[in-house]
Amino acid sequence: MKNISLLGATGSIGTQTADVVLKHPDLFRVRALSFGENVEKGAELVERLKPELVSVKNQDIKKRLSLRLSTPVRIVTGPEGLLEVAAYPDADIVLNALLGAVGLPPTLAAIEAGKTLAIANKETLVTAGHLVMKKAVDKGVTILPVDSEHSAIFQALKNEKRSQVKRLILTASGGSFRDLTRDQLKDVTVEEALKHPNWSMGAKLTIDSATMMNKGLEVIEAHWLFDMPYEQIEVLIHKESIVHSLVEYDDTSVIAQLGEPDMRVPIQYALSYPDRVESPGAKRLNLWETGVLHFAKVDMDRYRLLKWAYQAAEVGGTALTVLNAANEAAVFAFLNKEIPFLSIESLVYQALEAHEAIADPDLDTIQNVDQQTRAFVRQLIARQ
């Protein structure tokens, strides 16, 4: 039995984690969880998972949740509540499925408490990979990837020598607009952008997939997770999302991990590692049914946010904080129908151009730059 603290329980990864846990009650138990404002979904998960501790956004959400529950549970609030869930003494593994930079302090708290960390919060490693990985080494903490691409690389690297790796190759579906020209992107709607062809994901991640910023963030994440130089990490368009990622070795051998697109599988692998268990409800891959797999080189002019993510990664330091914060602010503005789709790119570019990067920032500096960048982007939007 593995005891779990689940951060971000009502999001896409969080609800799929709950599904995995409920299908394996003999293997997993959620002892603590957090969510923000979705009281209806949160109450349902508390009743089904029966955690001992729940963290919510504020006192108002706490009151509303308490009125809906028949299950006794201790409820805490705010940033302090997230930290308490992350460091919950009875949890063996913390699965961080929080959205955005808010996931960084709980990540550090979980590592400080010596918990195994299953990470689906890209922004943690993007903005503070140097801090997270150093603390993990100092505390002897294992970090397990949850994203399908990083889980695939993790599996393809198993029992192999890292020194003999030639390339890490992250696959990308190309997102909702992969068949459109840049000219056709000018008038796309939020509703169109949210129709991902392969995956069921949250709104923000689906937009990041359409712009390919998600792949830029994943390149940075892979750099930290696998201690690999950026020039050895590549992105490959693969429409079917069957090949989740690949590793090439010095002898030209390429090892790939394949499967039907279903986030429950990498979630379950992170929870069950180093073992594998049955995946009830997951579709098995029959390649004769798939028939054909397509691959294409990425056009960096078509997907400019991916290009700028590589450039920000080479600069490092707070350039990565700006990249992430500007993108978050711009994506949420697009989702709120304040800006057109292509303005996401221009806002991120302007934020990066205006920033003078600070090398090796501490946590306070990262958080300050994050807030300054969001304010800067909001000012740019207000002027439009």
Image (spheres, rainbow, N blue to C red):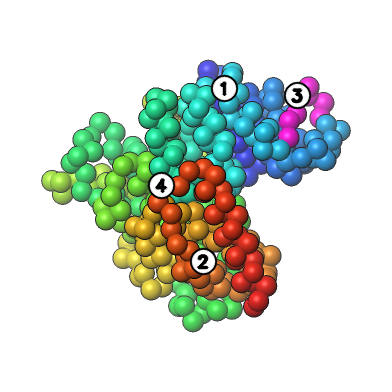
Q: Report the residue at 39% width, 54% height from top.
A: 316
Real-space Cα separation, disc 4 to disc 1, in angstroms: 31 Å
Mark 2 to mark 1 CA distance (whole Å): 39 Å
Q: Position of residue 290 (x, y in %)?
A: 39, 54
Instruction: Tell me if mark 2 has few (under 14), some (14-19) or many (20+) residues whose alpha carbon lies within 10 angstroms of its own.
Output: many
Instruction: Please tell me whether residue 70 belongs to the stretch shown in magenta.
Output: yes
Of the numbered discs 2 and 4, the one sitting upstream in the chain is 2
In this view, the residue in front, 14 or 161, is 161
State the residue at coordinates (18%, 41%).
164
Residue type beneath disc 3: Val
| Residue 364 in sight from this viewpoint | yes
Q: Is residue 103 above or below residue 135?
A: below
- Residue 298 position (above or below residue 142): below
* Spot occupied by residue 137 in the image (x, y as percentages of width and height): 38, 30
* Magenta-tinted stretch: 68-77
Residue identified by numbered label 3? 73
Return the residue at label 1. 91
Q: Which mark is residue 168?
A: none
Q: Nearer the viewer, mark 2 or mark 1?
A: 2
Q: Amino acid at mark 1?
A: Ala
- What's the distance in space between the residues labelled 3 and 4, CA to CA? 41 Å
Mark 1 or mark 3: whose residue is earlier in sequence:
3
* Chain-order first, disc 2 or disc 3: 3
